[in-house]
Image (cartoon, grey):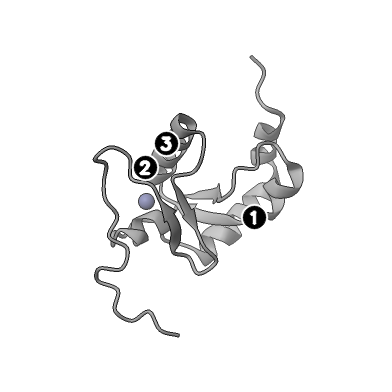
Amino acid sequence: MPLPHYKRWYKTARWQALRRRVLAEQPLCVMCEAIDRIDVAVICDHIEPHRGDEAKFWTGPFQGLCKPCHDSAKQRMEKSGRPTLTFGTDGWPIETRPRGGGRKLSLFGSQTDTGP
Ligand SMILES: [Zn+2]
């Protein structure tokens, strides 16, 4: 089976530069942060699946993820057919769908200073 056409976009200097910029702005995994964990983001992830859409691929929006979060998020999405976790513009997840006794997210438990 041939690779999807967008796979080669990941190999371009343009993508490498974009990825570096996203990870420089967002050095910590946002999914880990949501559950009070600290991990270094290594993957520049498309928040909305681009599905080969060139405009979406290059303009994002993006988020920094560590590899375990990236892989588990993608696997969940492949199983359920849609994202289980969506991040708003403020960086907080706006939709959670825990499935069958899975890890429960405590989003605001220790976060007291949420004001501007
Ligand atoms: Zn993570």
User: What amino acid type should be assigned to the residue bearing mark 1?
Assistant: Leu
x then y, percent, for residue 17:
65, 54
2 lies left or right of 113:
right
Identify the image quadrant of residue 75: top left
Q: Residue at x 59, y 48 (%)?
A: 48
The outermost residue toward the bottom is: 116
Q: Which mark is residue 76?
A: 3
Q: Name the residue nearer the viewer: 85 or 21.
A: 85
Observer-nearest of 37 and 12 = 37
- Circles 3 and 2: CB atoms closer than 8 Å: no
> Which residue is at a point 70% across and 55% down the rendered structure image?
59
Q: Secondary structure at mark 2?
A: helix
Say which amino acid is labelled 2.
Pro
Q: Residue 10: which disc?
A: none
Q: Position of residue 104 (x, y in %)?
A: 26, 50
Indicate which disc, 1 or 2, sits on the residue closer to the N terminus. Answer: 1
Q: Which mark is residue 18?
A: 1
The residue where tag 2 is placed is 68
The relative height of residue 72 versus residue 47 in the rendered view (above or below) is: above
Residue shown at the point (35%, 61%) measured from the top left: 33
Figure check: 4 above or below 31: above
x, y percent for residue 87: 49, 58
Q: Is residue 41 left or right of residue 53?
A: left
SS category of the residue bearing label 3: helix
User: Is mark 1 in CB contact (under 8 Å) with mark 2?
Assistant: no
